[in-house]
Image (tube, helix red, strand yellow):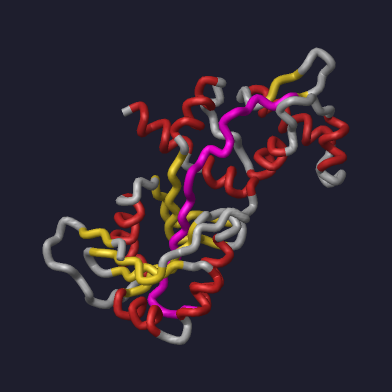
Amino acid sequence: MESWSGPVRRSGTMSFRFEQEMARPARAWLESRGLLVKSEFPTPWGICDLVGCALDTRSATRRLKLGQRSPIGSLARVRLLSIVPEGRPISLETLSQRLGGFTGRSEIAHEMDQLVAKNFVEITRTGMYLRRNGWEPLHKRIVALELKLRRLTDALNQAIAHLEFADEAYVGLPAHLAEQLALGTKRQQFLCAGIGVLAVGRNECRVVLPASRRSHGNPALQTYFAERFWRTYLKDIST
């Protein structure tokens, strides 16, 4: 079993009174796997307690060489960029058609101006748009971790939702409860869904059910969430 041991000598197996108390050892477990970590991570369906992301340093280097230092921006802008081709120019009218006519031309033009200003897109002589890429995907791995004291069904459903953007999703439970789950009737539900279970103690975390790595999430959503770690990455490489 994977484990992380903190600096405190005595291993803690006491129960937690609040879910927030589980965050410190859980965060350390994610960081020990080489992940950048963010807490209270907003998603379209609610808050994920902890998200860890490993960025691809080669992709990051290629992106910086293109002068794309700024984050892309909103989810709508990320989705718009995802439909701009790399090798063949596209017109504003075609972009509008591909968005199903739900976004006005003036709004699309404004977003494209922002992408041009940030070097993600260039304008051809004929006024069409061409994408400047060669680095996506930016991330190698995204891990979502939902912490719960109880309410296992809610925890499972939330973790499944997180697979829209995460390659792996875990539910972190107090150690005694996680160990009971790994041997109990709910074990098969977690295995079938590919959701891992993390036993969280005061000073250590252990994987009692491994997560299955998935790759069928929403690509635009994955890019958008990986972008949230971009500024952190830039700070790390500048220190």
Q: Is residue 143 magenta?
A: yes
Q: Residue 127 at what x, y percent from top left?
A: 82, 19
As rendered, which of 70 and 88 lies closer to the eye?
Answer: 88
Residue located 38% across and 32% down the image:
235
Residue located 34% across and 72% down the image:
18
Task: Note whether 159 is above or below 136 in the view shown.
Answer: below
Task: Note whether 140 is above or below 136 in the view shown.
Answer: below
Task: Note whether 236 is above or below 101 in the view shown.
Answer: above
As rendered, which of 77 and 9 lies closer to the eye?
Answer: 9
User: In the image, is 213 to the left or to the right of 224?
Assistant: left
Residue located 35% across and 46% down the image:
34
Q: Is residue 144 magenta?
A: yes
Query: What are the residue bounds of the magenta stretch?
Result: 130-152
Looking at the image, which residue sits at the far bottom?
185
As rendered, which of 1 and 106 lies closer to the eye?
Answer: 1
Q: Residue 91 at what x, y percent from top left?
A: 84, 27
Task: Note whether 98 is above or below 169 in the view shown.
Answer: above
**Image quadrant occupied by the C terminus:** top left
How many numbered badges does the structure rendering display? 0
**Image quadrant occupied by the N terminus:** bottom left
Looking at the image, which residue sits at the far top?
125
User: In the image, is 95 to the left or to the right of 56?
Assistant: right
Q: Residue 192 at what x, y percent from top left?
A: 54, 73
Q: Residue 85 at what x, y percent from top left?
A: 74, 31
Residue located 48% across and 54% down the image:
41
As rendered, which of 62 and 91 lies closer to the eye?
Answer: 62
- Specify the quadrant of the image occupied by residue 161: bottom right
